Amino acid sequence: MKGYAPSARVTRLAAQRSLGDHVFTRKNTGRPEVGGYGLFRLGGRTAAGGMQTTAEQGPPSWTVYFQAPDADATARAAEQKHGRVLVQPMDVQDLGRMAILADQAGVSFGLWQPGRNQGLEAVQEPGSLCWVELYTADVPATAAFYHSVLGLETAGVDFPSGIYTAFHPAGEGEEAMFGGVVPLSGDPAEEQAYWLPYFEVTDPDAVVARAGERGGTVRLPATDVPGVGRLAKLADPYGARFAVVRSERPEGQGTDLSEQHA
């Protein structure tokens, strides 16, 4: 899965987190030279990142980062397409260059221009990030924004419940799909536009039980979704939302939606 890395904005981080039987360990915890940022490792490989935040920075959440060859140019492109720059591009030592942006609907996301740190090393395997999903009020306008700013393309994928709009990198084809965009009107459980990360797990029901035992919130119990897999939506004890899934790989062909609002 290319193009993004997640970052957890949390009020407190323990030394370990687990998804099923897969344990995250924290590395470089709280180093002041990188703003207190640390990495979550899965089997010694980078799977996510996290840092302590203040009340002024908003509630705890996950931020989805997209890899960008030029963070400054991408930030300017976002502004030209009615987005905003929330955190100006900045160097993180020799690790890379980052920025935080908001899309045309105000949904925040990150940019990572790799330096010595190339991004995620563990993806699409149990315990790691496998999918990202954007909830928004206007799917065509959102698809057009990310197409213009990041070059992402979209395709409509047929499911028993209807057409799902999926993202994939430009020029890589639908087999490289890594996320989707969902209308808020299509899911009454979602009340605001935001990016939702999905973690692959082998037993969603066990993860749901474990989340409840450890102070988390079950937003959607483990549910079978035809063509997708068995998934659940959760929030950690501090309110940061995420989902888990035991995946089935969807099949389907569709048309590119990103040109509708170019």
Image (cartoon, rainbow, N blue to C red):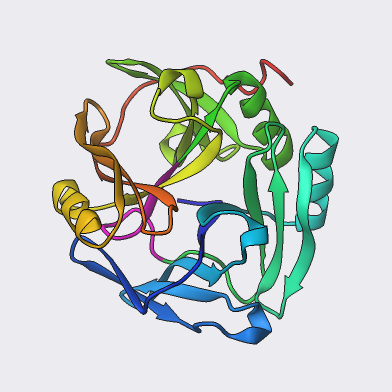
Q: Is residue 170 above or below residue 163?
A: below
Quadrant of the frame with the C terminus: top right
Relative to the observer, which residue lies in front, 49 or 185? 185
Asked whether 125 falls inside the magenta stretch, the response is: yes
Give the image location of residue 234, x and y in percent: 33, 47
The quadrant in which residue 132 appears is top left
Q: Is residue 243 above or below residue 6?
A: above
Could you tell me if residue 74 is visible in this image?
no
The quadrant in which residue 171 appears is top right
Q: Residue at x 52, y 17 (%)?
A: 255
Instruction: Report the predominant secondary structure element of the magenta stretch.
Output: loop
Relative to the observer, which residue lies in front, 176 or 28? 28
Q: Residue at x 40, y 23 (%)?
A: 188
Asked whether 26 falls inside the magenta stretch, the response is: no
Q: Residue at x 72, y 32 (%)?
A: 104
Left/right placement of residue 125 relative to residue 88 reads left
Q: Residue at x 81, y 56 (%)?
A: 72
Give the image location of residue 52, x and y in percent: 55, 71
Read off the magenta span.
Answer: 122-132
Give the image location of residue 59, x and y in percent: 55, 54
